[in-house]
Image (cartoon, rainbow, N blue to C red):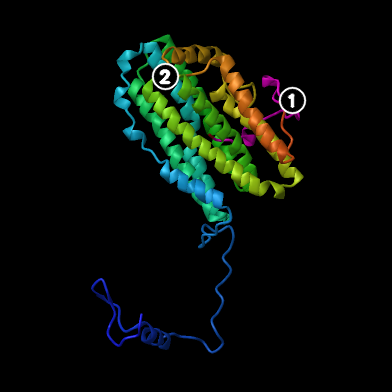
Amino acid sequence: MALSAEPQTIGGVDHGPAKGASKLALESRLVIPASGFEPAPEVPMPNIFPLEWEVKTEELAALYEKSKVQAWNPATLPWDDLDPSQYTAEERLGIMYWYAVLANFDGSGPAVFGRAMIHSYEVHAEDPLRKCFFSVTRDEMNHEECCQRAIAKVMPGGPLRFEVKTALDRAALNNIQWLYHNGGRYWRGYSNSIDKYPLSVLFTSFLMGEVAASTLFYGMAHKTTSPVFKQVFTRVGQDESRHLAICIKMLENDWPRLNQAHKDLITRQLRAGFVFLSMILWEPPNLFWELPNYFIPNHRVLMDAARQAGLGVLSYDEQAENWRIAIARVKKVVEDWGIKFPAIPELDISGVDVSNITAADIIPVF
Ligand SMILES: [Fe+2]
Ligand SMILES: [Fe+2]
């Protein structure tokens, strides 16, 4: 644009004289010490925000964009088609129980990934990675909302304050209370670990959770006889596959920098992932979980009630097979990176012996 003495107006606002003149006028008002500007103090680390948007991994930026395109709203799913009167009281309890078990994982998702997102800002991770964590936090809030809506529909007051009338109700409530107790123990371990480990170690734990989640929801979307739950599982499964892709991309970048101590820690984390996630994918082994000895027999009864309702819960053997396939995928990925896989004797998977998993070892989320 040619310089002009006329005042420049944009959208009716007077922006003063033309560019050249404006620059001179502004510079004449500056205060510049004879010795030059003083450098600002170094920003101490960890510091909550990097004040720049560095993009190192275009694929992560693309995954974040995909999360926006695939956005969905749990509130607009056809919940009204889910008629509680089509189920028996036992089936309604079974659906509520399965969702309560899931909520024990999904309920922690927003806080766990929110915490990880803050951490990614503190360590000045690249911009697309910070954004990906934000999108996972957003997704997990939707997944938690699905638990909330499904339970509200079939069992108002659930999972902890529904009207308890029968022995089956009492058994369900007691099992859910025990699960909740264990969920609280998991948070402390996770929260203490986040500053201790590099992001890639955390991501390997997440990898196990995302593989588990995408496998679970894919299987249930195929098996459920309810059109509403089919939509829910399909949407959630799509999100979980994207979370998995984020984890794998991040780890592809990072694994060459892992030292042997980190690799050993990852081996341990993978075993912890199996122990923790088996509660929702299959049945929990006798490690970490503090449960009364009647928990599993009652859990089986309640899972049968959910199956009977057509929720899409796989059989015990189908669950074991699904879990085995999912774990084989993770095993292949991490072994390609020179990380040893733990033995999973419960599923006849050989590897490094890792025993004694405690609450402090549990990082994996869903
Ligand atoms: Fe999720
Ligand atoms: Fe996820």
- Say which residue label 1 marks: 350
- Magenta residues, dominant SS class: loop
> What is the three-letter code of the residue carrying label 1?
Ser
Q: Quadrant of residue 361?
A: top right
Residue 278 in the image: state x and y as whole percent. Answer: 58, 24
* Residue placed under numbered mark 2 in the picture: 95
Residue visible at 60% across and 19% down? 320
The spot of residue 234 in percent (x, y) is 44, 29
Residue 190 inside the magenta-drawn segment: no
Span of residues in magenta:
344-365
Residue type at mark 2?
A: Ile
Mark toward the start of the polypeptide (2 vs 1):
2
Is the C-beta of the residue carrying label 1 under 8 Å from the nearest atom of ligand 2? no
Depth check, front residue: 172 or 257: 257
Q: Residue shown at 59%/15% (left/top)?
A: 317
- Look at the numbered disc 2 and give the secondary structure of its residue: helix
Q: Does any portion of residue 155 appear in the rendered image?
A: no
Residue 34, image x, y percentages: 54, 89
